């Protein structure tokens, strides 16, 4: 059985809080979804805003290999005597998409309280709207809005709404769990009844208000649904839509259903994260399958077990979805964690050598260091302990000054950096003392290592440790850096936030020069 995947990230997903796509973003998301192998992409609601219509115009210029673009709208307005004169339906036709999806009311409560029309009038509206769109030779999907609440309240009428769409010529019908409050067993029972009564392909569209969006979708498929609607990363209004990043691998690797090509699924993690970037949202690191923590192991016993057989603590091979296994190092770590990291670095090391490294890690973590999100600092610690990494530069001294002049705060930093036998002394301004210090450090280092121009700060976090000490408390600074191809994290701890930041910055630049830089230091 083939399951068709219908993505509504660009329409329903964009209704989520803090989510905003530009026209260019929407085109890029569509290209990524096509690359993944999604069968349908719902691009938006033409006529509701200029951006969506511009998207439909722009996407026609793009050659898509796997997907059909769908325009979304509603049944005709009740006040229109002739559906062919309905502005909404005309805009759907003008979008020139091969697929049109319209929603209509299937809950009698909504018909009488929202549309405020007769129940039979609503059924005619559904049938006539679908028939009009079909007369323009388009594939038409009917979304039965609030179907499950409607079925619980009045099953006979909810089914009549589906019959009306079928009578109008709909190619398929999608059952929408719009309020997101149903439980999996309810979804299964109702979808089972519908698939036995309706002689059309049945789809499912779930929201996540009860935390069951993915489970409800899976149950609908088990009950006979052959099309799945959802969004990437679960974006959407309120608590979001059913998350395709979980649904697709569940369908493929848990139910062994034909949906997305396994080779394409290896791109899932990358595409999921890129869509988060385009939505200007932090990626959910604890998201199943595609999160950075999805296959992360911290307890020493777990690490020891996965070394023997990864199935002991992993439900699938992370590479199937383009993710990777991570072993975290913390105060809970044992020798297994360190040994695993050494193996990743292709370093042979006996237990006697590992033991002092483990003790040093625990000592530093007790002082406030945290290496779970600072794997670059951890790698440098190990390499330096084994004498396998040099310091590309050393800080001789630094100073940061804040001054207020006529209600304007000015920040200036100076730093002395030693590379080989040469000392470079630079001064720079910045937006705050840490930024000024970073600018001064970069200014000095690029004279020796011009490749550092490729490095930029991706994230900066400060955590106050033992807050009861007030302004004297120790602080931990976590920095994520990146170049075009790589991301890495470093950490610094001090009672002085500027010094803690500098420690993390120094680790970041040293790590880059050791790990990624291709050029060699200029000779002076």
Image: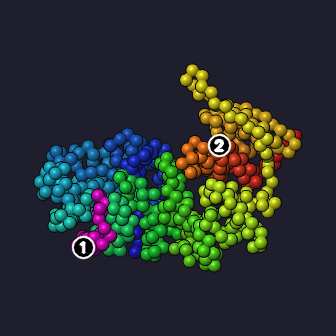
Determine whether 342 is above or below 399 in the image: below
Callout 1 secondary element = helix
* Of the two numbered discs 2 and 1 in the rendering, the one whose residue sits closer to the viewer: 2
Question: Residue 100's x, y, as percent?
Answer: 33, 54
Residue 13 forms part of the magenta stretch? no
Categorize mark 2 by other alpha carbons within 10 Å: few (<14), some (14-19), many (20+): some
| Mark with earlier residue (2, 1) | 1
Q: Which residue is most to the front?
A: 469
Q: In the rendering, at what x and y percent does residue 498 appear?
A: 65, 41
Q: Position of residue 83 (x, y in %)?
A: 20, 49
Which mark, residue 496? 2
Residue lying furthest top in this view?
Answer: 406
The quarter in which the N terminus is drawn is bottom left
217 or 403, nearer to the observer? 403
Which residue is painted at 37% across and 55% down in the image?
A: 239
The magenta region covers 174-199
- Looking at the image, which is closer to me, 434 or 101? 434
Whole-number angstrom distance, CA of label 2 to CA of label 1: 66 Å
Query: What residue did someone put label 1 on?
Result: 193
Left or right: 515 as drawn, with respect to 135: right
Examine the rendering and report whether any part of residue 373 can be seen.
yes
Quadrant of the rendered image containing residue 111: bottom left
- The residue under the point 57% across, 42% down is 471
Q: Is residue 191 magenta?
A: yes
């Amino acid at each position: 059985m083939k399951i068709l995947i219908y993505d509504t990230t660009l329409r329903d997903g964009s209704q989520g809080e803090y989510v905003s796509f530009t026209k260019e973003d929407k085109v890029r998301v569509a290209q990524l979804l096509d690359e993944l192998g999604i069968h349908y992409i719902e691009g938006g609601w033409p006529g509701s805003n200029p951006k969506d219509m511009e998207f439909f115009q722009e996407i026609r210029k793009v050659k898509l290999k796997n997907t059909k673009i769908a325009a979304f709208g509603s049944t005709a307005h009740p006040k229109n005597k002739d559906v062919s004169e309905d502005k909404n339906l005309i805009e759907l036709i003008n979008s020139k998409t091969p697929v049109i999806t319209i929603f209509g009311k299937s809950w009698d409560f909504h018909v009488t309280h929202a549309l405020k029309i007769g129940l039979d009038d609503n059924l005619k509206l559904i049938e006539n709207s679908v028939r009009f769109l079909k007369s323009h030779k388009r594939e038409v999907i009917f979304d039965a809005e609030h179907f499950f609440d409607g079925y619980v309240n009045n099953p006979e009428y909810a089914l009549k709404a589906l019959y009306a769409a079928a009578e109008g010529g709909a190619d398929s019908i999608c059952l929408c769990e719009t309020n997101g409050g149903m439980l999996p067993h309810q979804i299964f029972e109702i979808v089972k009844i519908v698939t036995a009564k309706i002689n059309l392909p049945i789809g499912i569209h779930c929201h996540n208000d009860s935390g069951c969006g993915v489970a409800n979708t899976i149950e609908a498929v088990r009950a006979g649904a052959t099309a799945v609607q959802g969004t990437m990363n679960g974006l959407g209004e309120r608590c979001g839509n059913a998350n395709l990043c979980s649904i697709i691998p569940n369908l493929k690797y848990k139910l062994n259903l034909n949906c997305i090509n396994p080779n394409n699924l290896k791109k899932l993690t990358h595409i999921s994260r890129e869509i988060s970037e385009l939505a200007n949202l932090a990626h959910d690191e604890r998201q199943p399958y595609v999160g950075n923590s999805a296959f992360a192991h911290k307890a020493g016993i777990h690490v020891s077990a996965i070394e023997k057989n990864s199935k002991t603590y992993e439900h699938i091979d992370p590479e199937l979805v383009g993710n990777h296994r991570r072993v975290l190092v913390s105060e809970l770590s044992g020798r297994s964690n360190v040994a695993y990291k050494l193996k990743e670095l292709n370093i042979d090391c006996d237990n006697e050598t590992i033991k002092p490294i483990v003790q040093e890690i625990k000592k530093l973590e007790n002082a406030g260091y945290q290496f779970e999100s600072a794997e670059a600092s951890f790698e440098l610690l190990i390499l330096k302990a084994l004498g396998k990494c040099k310091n590309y530069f050393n800080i001789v001294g630094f100073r940061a000054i804040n001054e207020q002049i006529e209600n304007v705060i000015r920040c200036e930093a100076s730093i002395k950096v030693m590379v080989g036998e040469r000392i470079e002394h630079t001064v720079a301004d910045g937006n705050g003392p840490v930024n000024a210090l970073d600018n001064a450090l970069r200014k000095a280092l690029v004279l020796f290592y011009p490749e550092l121009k490729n490095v930029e700060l991706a994230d900066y976090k400060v955590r106050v440790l033992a807050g009861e000490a007030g302004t004297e408390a120790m602080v931990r600074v976590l920095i994520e850096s990146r170049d075009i191809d790589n991301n890495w994290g470093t950490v610094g701890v001090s009672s002085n936030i500027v010094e803690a930041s500098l420690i993390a910055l120094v680790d970041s630049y040293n790590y880059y020069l050791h790990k990624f830089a291709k050029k060699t230091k200029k000779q002076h």
